[in-house]
Structures are given as C-alpha cells and as structure tokens.
Image (spheres, grey):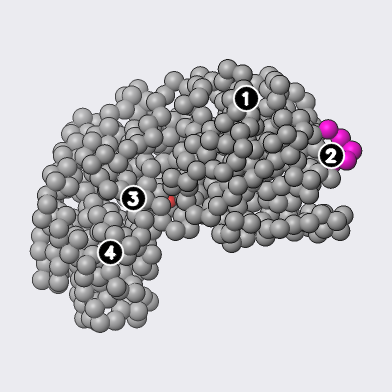
Amino acid sequence: MCGIFGYVGNKNDAADIVLEGLKLLEYRGYDSWGVAVKVRKKLSVDKHIGKIGDAQVNLPQSVLGIGHTRWATHGGVTAANAHPHMDCTKTIAVVHNGIVENFQELKTELIEKGHKFISETDTEIIPHLIEENLKKEGFASSVRDAFNSLKGLNAVVVAYAPSREIVAAKTGSPLVVGIGKNELFVASDASAIVKHTKKVIFLEDNQMVILGKRLKLINLPGGKEIKPTINKINWKFEHGEKGKFKHFLLKEINDQRTTIIDAVTQNEKKLFEFANLIRNSFDTYISGCGTAGHACRMATYIFSTIAKKHINFAIGSEFSYYEDFLTDKSLLIVASQSGETIDLVEAVSAARRHKSKVTALVNVIGSTLYRQCDLVLPLRAGVERCVLSTKSFTSKLAIFYLLAFILKGEYSEGRKKIIKTARAVGELLDDKEFNQQLKNVADEIYKTKDIYILGRGFSFPLALEAAHKIKEASYIHAEGFAGGEPKHCEISLVSEGTPTIVFVPNDETKSAIISNATEFKARGAYIIGIGPEKQAVFDEWIQVPDLGVTSSIINIIPAQLLAYYLALKKGNDPDKPRNLAKSVTVK
Ligand code: BG6
C-alpha cells in the first residue's frame, strides 16, 4: 500500500499542495516519497528516501502535480525506486499503488523497443507503456490501453505535461477524486482531499477518470463514458493530535478509556439488526487481518461462551481460499480499522460471488469496506494514526461482546459490564505504578532474542495480539501460543531466562495455564504473569482487575504498554515501525 495524491487546477503551488496531501497519507507507507510537477511541456521530479517529516519540496511553481509516499514491494528503498516514475521523454509521470504481476514480460518487450529503465520497480514500466501507445493514439486512450494490459490489483495516477491532464485508473487499490472550484484532486483516500473539497467521487474497480479541462469518468476495459456519482462528505475527518503524549501509540492506548464506551454507543436499530443476522444465519464466518484478525479470533470465543453461537474464523488473507463453502445463506463479518485492507476486500468479493450477506466492523467512514458491505457497525474509535492498532482492537472486542450479549438477551446488562470494564481501563492507565512497572519490565527484557506469550481460551487470541504488538513495536521475535501447544514443540526453544508472558485470568483456563507456565519455568523461562491474583510460578506479577467474562478487554492493556516501552528502549519509532504501514492495499 502506498499514498497517492494528484492536483490539477488554477493554483500554481501544485508541489506544496501535493506534499501536504502526501503527509496525510503517510500512514499508508513511508519508505520514500516523491513529487512531479508540470514545467512547460515537461515534468520535473523531486524524490527522497525516508519519511516526509518537515521536508520541503524543491520544485518550480506549477498548476499540475502528482506525488507518492511508498511502501516498497518491488525494488529496495532507494531514491531511484521512489515514485513518480517517468518515460524516456519526461512528459509522462506515474505514481502507483499495487503490484503489476506481469511486469517482467512487459519490461522485456519495452527494453527490446529501446526503452531505458533506471529503477527495479514494476511501476516504471507503466509510463513507458503509455509512451509507446502515444505513438498511435491520444493520451487518455494510451493510459486506458496501458492499464488494461496490467495484471494484478492496481491504482495508477498519470500526469501528462503537454495536455496538462491527469488520468487515474484502478482495480483493487482505492482512489478518490475531489471536485473543487476550478481544481481537481485525486488521492488514495478522502482524508487527504477533504480540506479542499467535500465533493468526491469514489472510483470503483475498472474505472478511469480524466482530470483536465473537465472531468470524464470512463468504464474499463472498453472506454465508454459514464455519469459519475458525486458524494458529499458529511463526516468529520480528524487527523488526530498527540496532545500531551509523546507518541500517537501512547495517546491511542490512553484513548481506550472512552473509545470502548463509544464503541458500544451505537445506533441500537443497526446493532440489533446486526445481531439478528448472526442469529438467523445458517453459517457465520468472521475474518480480519493482523490485529483485526486476533479480534475476530477472540469473537469465536465470545460468541461461543456468551451466546452459545458457533462462528467460523478465517485469517483475512486466507479467506478467499475457503470460498467454496459459502452459500446464499452464509453471513460474512469482516473487521477492519482502515476499511481498505485488500485481503478483506477480496474476502467480500468472494462472499458476493456466492450471494452471501456481508457485514463489517470498520473505523474509517467512507472507506471501501464501509461502502461495500450490506451492514456496517462503525468502531467510533476516532482516527487511529499509529500503525499499531490498539484502540481499534478493544473497540472491536467491545462490539463483539455487545452483540453476543444481545444474542443472549442481556443487552443492557452486557453494555453495563463493558462500560464498567472501560472505566477500569481508565483507572489502570492512570495508575503511575502500573506504568512504571511495565517500563521496568521493558528495561529487564529488551535485550532478549525471543519472547513467548501463553494464553488459553479467551486469552489465546490475547497471546497472539500481545506478540503482535511486541514484534511491531520492538522488532524482537515474539510468539503467542495456545497454552497447551508448546509442550508438543516450542518448549524445546526455551532457554535460561527466556521471558514468557502468561495470561492467568480467573476463568476455566486458570489451573491448566499455570501448569503450562510451570513447564516453561522448569526449563529456565522468566515468567511474567498478567492476572488478578499472584501465582507462585510468577517471577513478575502484573496485576489487572478481575472483570469476569469481559476481562479480555483490559488484559491486553499491559501488553500494549509493554510494547510501547520496549519500542522506546530499542530506540524505534513507535508510530511508524520499519517495513510496516497502517493499511495494506496490496495482496
Ligand atoms: C496492518 C496494520 O498493516 O494491517 C495492523 O499494521 C492492522 O495494525 C492490519 O491490524 C489490518 O488493518 P485493518 O485496517 O484492516 O484493521
């Protein structure tokens, strides 16, 4: 996934407008960035590796510009591989989000025709394809034919200096067009456009748009002009501020005292409609990626224990390989903070192919999944700027718990339990000794090569999520296990002092997980216990309140904070970890 931004209009500071847009899209990837602007009949480009930060762009004034902030897929993190990429004549510039699966064969053909390449990227073949087509047709049809020849899920934005036009096309990765007064915008998502205009067009798959003297929307692959649907953005885009916190990660961990409550403050009609879909569905499938995937896995325990309902979980990137079991009586629930994760967009397409009902829990209003699903419950977590998902994780858990309580016929009692849990989260976050203890644990273990995390039942997805947080933030190898599994294999990896975090809530897993911790301790592991009661096997006890069946929501808090303090100890950027991005729109 990458961030794309384009501008053409009557202002002559296109470069600055584009750079400002890219800064709002950096959550999509931040290996490198670049801007190209029209200078008379040519394009001039300025590219850099690293994050944008406070950089200024060194380009002349212009009325047309495109830009890109990159998450590397093909080719290392170098200025040469940064976008925009140009053709031999320097009149065409392209920025791209996606993967051109047939780029090698296209590149070979272009080299045989004499085209010179300076990067290792798949993207660079696109401007040369267009250059080749321009020998026999106009600019827009040259882009159309070049785009139609690409295999894979791609979004491209092409600038052409001679005609002062931008053409954009997409299959898969998102693109939004903004319609201003004598100016037009195109970006990866509306949050980068809304400052300029609230009139937007969400490009659908296999559509192309020509932004020039006027706007034309084209259907691909044929090229027939179609009437655009213009949406008015009526929702607020906060870009989020750190406030008193040093990093978004700590700020968003602390937001949970209110976001968990906001998550269960939903439109009740929609909430009950959603619960009824689960109640009446012949088979329900739930899917998410990364942290959202761990929340979905937790949902299977929540619905089983509270609502006696069987829900099938599949990791987002694997879901479409299961599609053959879907029927028109199936229900798919996807959970996604960004609403753009391509694996889930693909899962929705798979479900649609079998006429299944598709519902979603999504944080970003107006995102692809928000628009494509039959029924959506917003997470209401506010903007989540840190690449690591924290508040969106507990918001998903809160909504899953509430839906399960509704199915059990205990909506108001369940909602009260969740709100009580949110209040306890706030008290824990305000507990200075608790925070200091986690800093101390980070000081003790940050040099370790491995960290293991054990949990059973509800705590198994927590073990996975805790490991996920620690890896994302500290780059330390961490692995979460169902407590009973390592005795079959991974216990062979335990050496003297290996930090092992164990979730020990007061539930039916308690005695068995203590046995598992004891097995690890017998092999030299350093046991860090998270639970309401101190256990003899603990070397370090991180106390959390016992909140009964909703304890999972609060039990993840120490793991989130530990990940944050480990990131600081390792000197990492907690908000923008290396090699990661907030929204993954490539497969
Ligand atoms: C990853 C993020 O790229 O995508 C994770 O770094 C996130 O934090 C995962 O859990 C899924 O993203 P989303 O937007 O679908 O919840």
Disc ID at residue 569: 4
In the displayed image of the protein, which residue is found farthest to the top? 181
Q: Disc 1 versus disc 4: distance between alpha carbons?
A: 47 Å
Bounds of the magenta span? 133-138
Q: Is there a contact, CB below 8 Å, between mark 1 and mark 3?
A: no
* SS type, badge 4: helix
Disc ID at residue 298: 3
* SS type, badge 1: strand
Residue at horizontal 32%, vertical 65%? 570
Residue at label 2? 134
Eye-nearest disc, 4 or 3: 4
In the displayed image of the protein, which residue is found farthest to the right? 136
- Residue 116, given in percent of the width and then of the height, sits at 78, 56
Residue at horizontal 68%, vertical 48%? 85
- Residue 548, given in percent of the width and then of the height, sits at 17, 48
Q: Disc 4 versus disc 2: distance between alpha carbons?
A: 54 Å
Reply yes or no: does residue 135 show up in magenta: yes
Q: Disc 3 versus disc 2: distance between alpha carbons?
A: 54 Å
Reply yes or no: does residue 303 show up in magenta: no
Mark 2 or mark 1: whose residue is earlier in sequence: 1
Q: Which amino acid is tagged 1?
A: Gly
Q: Is residue 441 left or right of residue 73?
A: left
Disc ID at residue 9: 1
- Front-most of residues 240 and 532: 240
Q: Which amino acid is tagged 4?
A: Lys
